[in-house]
Image (cartoon, grey):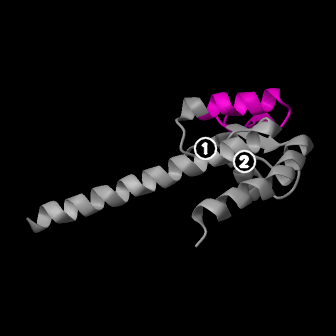
């Protein structure tokens, strides 16, 4: 009986986490939509801004795969859209032709700075104590 109760408690906590995540992602999507971004778009821009503090610095796409909650193919499509919009640039690694780098453009860095307070406001509202 105790195992069933513990399992039920874990399941309830897990469902609560999923619910908070889904509601928060939806709110971020709503806040960023007028700027042409979704929550996943912002996450990639935010990781690039954090990982590459100087303009022109690059981040290996493979390093992003482990940090975002997207498959490698979905991340590649997302980066393709961001590149098409002029927010990031991709380049091939000279040492390892299989490796792909991605970097924020100045337009991407400016948009990230513009929408960062909106995303942080949603996080504070949804996750704050």
Residue for badge 2: 59
Question: Percent position (x, y) of residue 16?
Answer: 41, 56
Asked which secondary structure carries label 1, the reply is helix
Q: CA distance from mark 1 to mark 2?
A: 27 Å
Residue closest to the eye, 41 or 35: 35
Callout 2 crowding tier (Cα within 10 Å): few <14, some 14–19, many ≥20 = some
Q: Which residues are magenta?
A: 75-99
**Res. 66 in view:** no
Query: Does the magenta portion include 111?
Result: no
- Above/below status of 84 relative to 37: above
Q: Which mark is residue 26?
A: 1
Q: Nearer the viewer, residue 112 or 76?
A: 112
Q: Position of residue 1 (x, y in %)?
A: 8, 64
Q: Earlier in the sequence, mark 1 or mark 2?
A: 1
From the viewer's perspective, is 97 left or right of 49? left
**Most distant residue in the left direction:** 1
Q: Is 98 within the magenta?
A: yes
| Res 2 visible | yes
Q: Is residue 9 above or below residue 38?
A: below
Q: For residue 106, which quarter of the picture?
A: top right
To which quarter of the image does residue 87 belong?
top right
- What residue is drawn where x is 23% and y is 59%? 8
Mark 1: few, some, or many residues within 10 Å (few <14, many ≥20)?
A: some
The residue sitting at the bottom extreme is 129
Pair 1/2: label in front? 1
Q: Quadrant of residue 2?
A: bottom left
Nearer-the-camera pick, 46 or 26: 26
54 or 14, which is in the foreground? 14
Q: Quadrant of the C terminus?
A: bottom right
**Identity of the residue drawn at 46% across and 51% down:** 19
Q: Residue at x 64, y 47 (%)?
A: 27
């Amino acid at each position: 009986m105790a195992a069933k109760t513990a399992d039920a408690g874990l399941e309830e906590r897990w469902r609560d986490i999923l619910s908070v995540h889904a509601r928060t992602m939806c709110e971020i999507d709503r806040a960023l939509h007028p700027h042409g971004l979704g929550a996943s778009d912002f996450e990639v821009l935010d990781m690039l801004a954090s990982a590459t503090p100087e303009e022109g610095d690059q981040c290996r796409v493979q390093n992003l795969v482990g940090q975002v909650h997207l498959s490698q193919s979905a991340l590649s499509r997302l980066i393709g859209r961001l590149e098409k919009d002029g927010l990031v640039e991709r380049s091939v690694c000279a040492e390892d032709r299989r490796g792909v780098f991605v970097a924020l453009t100045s337009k991407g860095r400016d948009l990230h700075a513009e929408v960062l307070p909106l995303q942080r406001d949603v996080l504070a509202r949804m996750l704050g104590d």
